């Protein structure tokens, strides 16, 4: 009985992992880059602002800063954008800046 439960948990875990990975890949396939501009489904969503370097714990850290453009209505889009840029620049940190007038800020 215990073995059956463990096997079932294994297949559920593997199934969820594969499903998540395929959804993430599908979302990231909708992003494109042209020079310093990032597009989602052909619509401009962000501009590369800067590439910076810093030392953290004695190690050199590369960071890409992007400026989000347009009205932000879905925070998941920011997560997807960060994932896309992170995959493109392996090992680098990614920062997305959002102007207060473009996002939903409540102070």
Image (tube, rainbow, N blue to C red):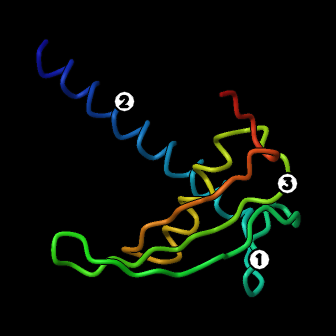
SS for dot 3: loop
**Residue at 59% of width from left, 79% of height from top?**
50
Q: Which one is in front in this view, the residue at disc 2 or the one at disc 3?
A: 3
Pointer 1 or 2: first along the chain: 2
Residue 53 position, x and y percent, is: 39, 81
Q: Residue furthest left?
A: 2
**Residue at far front of view:** 107
Along the line of sight, the residue nearer the viewer: 15 or 66: 66
- Residue at point 53%, 81% (across, down): 51
Which residue corresponds to mark 2?
Answer: 12
Mark 1 sits on what residue?
37
Q: Which mark is residue 70?
A: 3
Marks 2/3: CA–CA distance = 39 Å
Q: Position of residue 66 (x, y in %)?
A: 64, 68
Q: Nearer the viewer, residue 48 or 29?
A: 48
Residues at circles 1 and 3 in contact by the CB criterion of under 8 Å:
no
């Amino acid at each position: 009985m215990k073995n059956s439960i463990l096997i079932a948990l294994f297949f559920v875990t593997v199934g969820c992992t594969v499903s998540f990975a395929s959804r993430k890949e599908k979302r990231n396939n909708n992003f494109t880059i042209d020079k310093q501009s990032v597009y989602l489904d052909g619509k401009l969503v962000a501009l590369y602002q800067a590439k910076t370097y810093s030392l953290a714990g004695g190690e050199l850290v590369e960071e890409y800063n992007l400026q989000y453009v347009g009205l932000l209505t879905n925070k998941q889009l920011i997560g997807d954008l960060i994932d896309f840029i992170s995959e493109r620049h392996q090992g680098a940190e990614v920062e997305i800046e959002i102007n207060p007038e473009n996002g939903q800020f409540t102070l």
